Amino acid sequence: MEPINVDFTKGKKDGGEPVNEVYIPVKHSVRKILINLALTVVFGLIAYYVMIPALNPKAIELYIYIACVCLIYLGLTVLSTKVAVHPEYTPYLKKRARIPGIIIGIVAIVCILGYIVGAQIFRAHSYSHLITVEDGDFTEDVAEIDFSSVPTLDSTSATNLAVRTLGDLSDMVSQFVVSTYSTQINYKNTPVRVYSLAYGDVFKWLKNTRKGLPAYIIVDMTNQKSEIVRLDKGMKYSPSEYLNHYLLRHLRFKYPTYLFGEPSFEIDEQGQPFWIVPILDKTIGLFGGTDVIGAVVVNAIDGSCNIISTSPEHKTKLPTGSFVTDENWQWIDHVYSAQILNDQYNYYGKLSNGFINSIIGQEGVKVTSSGYNYLALNDDVYMYTGVTSISSDQSIIGFVLLNQRTKETHYYPISGALENTAMTSAEGKVQQYSYNATFPLLLNISGEPTYFVALKDSSELVKMYAMVNVKQSTIVGIGANLTECTENYAAELKSNGIHLDIDIDSMAESDSTADAPSLDEITGVITEIRSVVTGGETYFYLKLNSSASYYKLSAANAEKVVILNIGDTVTVSFEAGSDGDIITAKGLV
């Protein structure tokens, strides 16, 4: 770098006394400033591409970005003046740093004032009105138990099933992993959890990004079956991408001023994959009162976008040209995240009587319990959580159901055991097995609010089920299946003076129907046989001349498969409606 030429001849006052200041020729100073500004623009654009802040005064990321750009300019100025080698250039550096320093100071002041004007201590009333809570009727709002739609898995167990399913496919497991983005949805009136795939690492991304992610995984939460759904065209837009197809970067360039929430992965009723990305607004002060005003529905394959609104009054905050009414998107289940709903209800519970009351006195102050689960009602997904008094965490005083699509919230006053207490009661019934209980799901069994708990072993496999009465946590029914569990629970209730009007036979039939789906059969001549060992089990893949699919059979379920040869004629049974390059078969007929 060219050294700076310093002119000391002008450094004197009128009286001839030297001034402790360095003067740099104007031509050198201007040139250095222009170079530094040009480099700042270049590095600033790179920083914007990486940070992708919203160009919105309510985005704290924007102020961080502005401060970073100023620091980049200051760093370049320090390097160009070589002040570390020439400390006499410090006065010049201070002059050049004045404007960036002022900008950083203004940014800091704006951020501090923005937080102050939106602080809960001053705006408690506004925070408590972020959500509208209505009283509900449990027996009317929560339908009685239907075994065919009761989720028997939690998210951890479902994830393990998804990972195991991907591991069975040798052509995918070497390149992809199960993504952390999964969502529990209602798919064809069945609660399922859908998983996107992700690239194994950056090198596997480079190899596969042109075709995109080739499949997603569906885990049925009722019968614990997992399948991989291959796509004709890969998903080219996802959070696992790195460049322009990175989901949030794709949206930032399309909608530069919007604040975005955490994406959720969903599929429509035809099985097409989408990303649902909430559009956020800060409704209190500059940074407080996070709420959802809409969502961008992104086609995961081609990146096309549509915008839906959470309510008519939010239309003015969304682009009129791309606004689509949410009636056209009833299949969407997750617009409001569980975290936002939980936070807003806690604001309502703590701040309704003012900020001071939430600290001193705490009259009527209530908060959600330590966890939450999901409940399928009327083709929507509701977040369930217990509500407890802030002065006592030993029992619930009620519970809430919050619609994750509309934010409709109902409160049900009922005293009973905390979810953690119910989990402990269930584990105590089978303590000899050392099973762990999942976070409870709330069920309505003949008008009795009941916690439903799955009991898992150390391998995260569901072994048994438990039903715990909300009002009396000592009433626990245990069973190896849902029917047995309900029978034992009803017996326990009866012994405690509570009689339920339950038709066990019809429930058993429903349970049996859920566990035994209708089957199809196909007959053909074997043209190809492949085998793979996964998780200690051997699986065979049969290709028949009568189908383009491979039929996957476990040697443990169909022992005869180990003696089959190419040219043999076989009949394979599989679940009705199954489709794809690989179909999981039920057995040989």
Image (spheres, grey):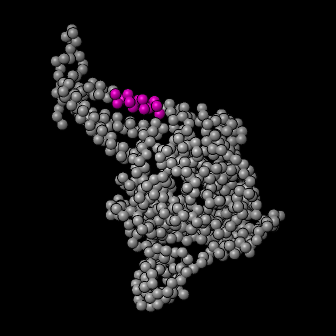
In the picture provided, is 46 more to the left or to the right than 329?
left
Counting from the top left corner in percent of width and height, residue 310 is at 57, 48
Question: Can you name the residue that lies furthest to the top here?
Answer: 15
Q: How many marks?
A: 0
Q: In this rendering, does residue 195 appear at all?
A: no
Depth check: 287 or 271 in front?
Answer: 271
Is 109 inside the magenta-drawn segment?
yes
Counting from the top left corner in percent of width and height, residue 111 is at 47, 33
Is 404 inside the magenta-drawn segment?
no
Write the residue at 81% across / 65% down.
499
Write the residue at 69% across / 38% down.
362
Write the residue at 79% across / 66% down.
500
Examine the rendered structure and indicate whether residue 480 appears above or below residue 557: above
Label the magenta part by its dominant secondary structure: helix
The region drawn magenta spans 99-111
Question: Can you name the residue that lies furthest to the front here?
Answer: 321
Query: Where the N terminus falls, by quadrant?
Result: top left
Counting from the top left corner in percent of width and height, residue 346 is at 63, 44
Write the residue at 35% across / 61% down.
209
Quadrant of residue 149 in the image?
Answer: bottom right
Quadrant of residue 17 in the image?
Answer: top left
